[in-house]
Amino acid sequence: MNATSPPVIGIIGGGQLGRMMALEAPRLSLKIRCLDANGADSPCGRYSEAGCVEGGLKDEAKLLELAKGCNVITMEIEHVSVPALATLESQGVTVRPSSNTIRIIQDKYVQKDHFARNGVALGRYMDCPGKEEVRKAIGLFGLPLMLKSRKEGYDGRGNAVVRTLSDVDSKFDELYNAGKSGGVYCEGWVDFVDELAVMVVKGANGDVKSYPTVTAIQRDSVCRVVVAPARCSREARLKAEEVARKAISSLGDGAVGIFGVELFLTREGDVLLNEVAPRPHNTGHYTQDACAVSQFENHLRAVAGMELGDTSMCVGAAAMVNVLGCGEMRETLKVNDLALGMERATVHWYGKSPAKKGRKMGHVNVTADSESELQTNLKILLDAVGLPEE
Ligand code: ATP
Ligand code: MG
Ligand code: MG
């Protein structure tokens, strides 16, 4: 690498999040290199100007190969090997966010403990090394109780709801074995009125900026729709941004990059942190078309050590609708045809196939001058993806 060649960012993982980073990189005069099991044929691999490494995301030798020729290593997924990241760091590779940040976030119980110690508002939680502790938690927090795998969870896989005492054995075994086994912990049930989310970006110089709070609509624990700004009081929106910034600031110097902060808004108007993702996040996709600088660009700026960009919205309102595979490509692409003909709508496809049922295939962003003006197009899109009641 010489002083005039563009810096190279290595991404662990070559899925859609990496791809959307890669699509932003040339404008910043950055190059992408990625590690993925599908190498150059992954959604990000096809846009990796500095090449790809084909291999497992937790394979230390492959990570070292990725790091060769990169100025900094980042990731699009938190389910990576913390010891392997630490090895890279010990060899002088810059990893952003750092192995210690990933260590805290990757284990949801450690994450909760970290945020609790740092005064971030949370629901109740308890470690459950065995079934006895689950029964004890029911005594303390009541039913239903949310059991979660400490590690490797996503899209609700790794969560199980205990509704009666007789559920305890089967739900515990199911999670314990599925998590293979990073262990299990539980959370008291949060009776939320809405799920909110805030993207926060932290620069290498310690600057912290947040994007506006959004409403995240989930179905079966999968994010389906995001509305920005959030459909709640201004007070709740500001509180959510404050909680999110406090959480990310508490992670320390190594926490460089973009973070997705998922939150609950309770009936009483409290904002509680659910979980943090140390990477671009589905609830931040709207920023591509609604904000001055997108979450992907800001992530690249942060990890490359550049100044952070403007996180404010440059439109009055926006929504993002996820397009999930419905088993058949042509059927899945129908939303595409609809969105292509729609004013102020943009399509973002991830280049995945086949269109397996429930697989995240792409998303549509739609913007408007106001929330009321957003409604017509949003309703058409929601009907098209089978969410007519929203
Ligand atoms: P992601 O795909 O966002 O990483 P995940 O698998 O890590 O999801 P969580 O975010 O922990 O799972 O939970 C998934 C969903 O389950 C939440 O978005 C929320 O709807 C519900 N949920 C999680 N925790 C609780 C809780 N303590 N009380 C009530 N509902 C909850
Ligand atoms: Mg999660
Ligand atoms: Mg979640």
Image (spheres, helix red, strand yellow):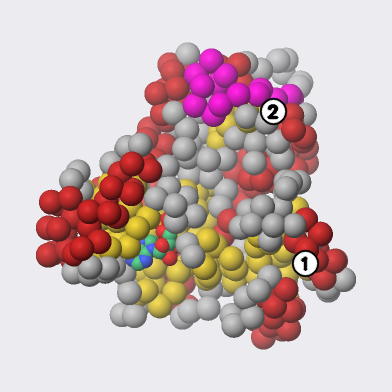
For the residue pair 187 and 385, the one nearer the viewer reads as: 385
Can you name the residue that lies furthest to the right here? 341
Q: Residue at x 51, y 22 (%)?
A: 59
Q: Residue at x 34, y 80 (%)?
A: 267
Q: Relative to residue 212, is residue 30 drawn left or right?
A: right
Q: Is residue 54 covered in magenta?
A: yes
For the residue pair 20 and 170, the one nearer the viewer reads as: 170
For the residue pair 78 and 206, the one nearer the viewer reads as: 78
Q: Residue at x 60, y 35 (%)?
A: 13
Q: Position of residue 181 (x, y in %)?
A: 32, 37
- Which range is magenta? 50-63
Q: Position of residue 167 (x, y in %)?
A: 25, 61
Dot label at residue 39:
2
Question: Residue 268, located in which quarter of the rendered image?
Answer: bottom left
Q: Residue at x 59, y 71 (%)?
A: 227
Name the residue that disc number 1 marks.
Answer: 335
Looking at the rendered structure, the secondary structure element under dot 2 is helix
* Quadrant assignment for the C terminus: bottom right
Q: Relative to residue 352, is residue 255 drawn left or right?
A: left
Q: Is residue 62 covered in magenta?
A: yes
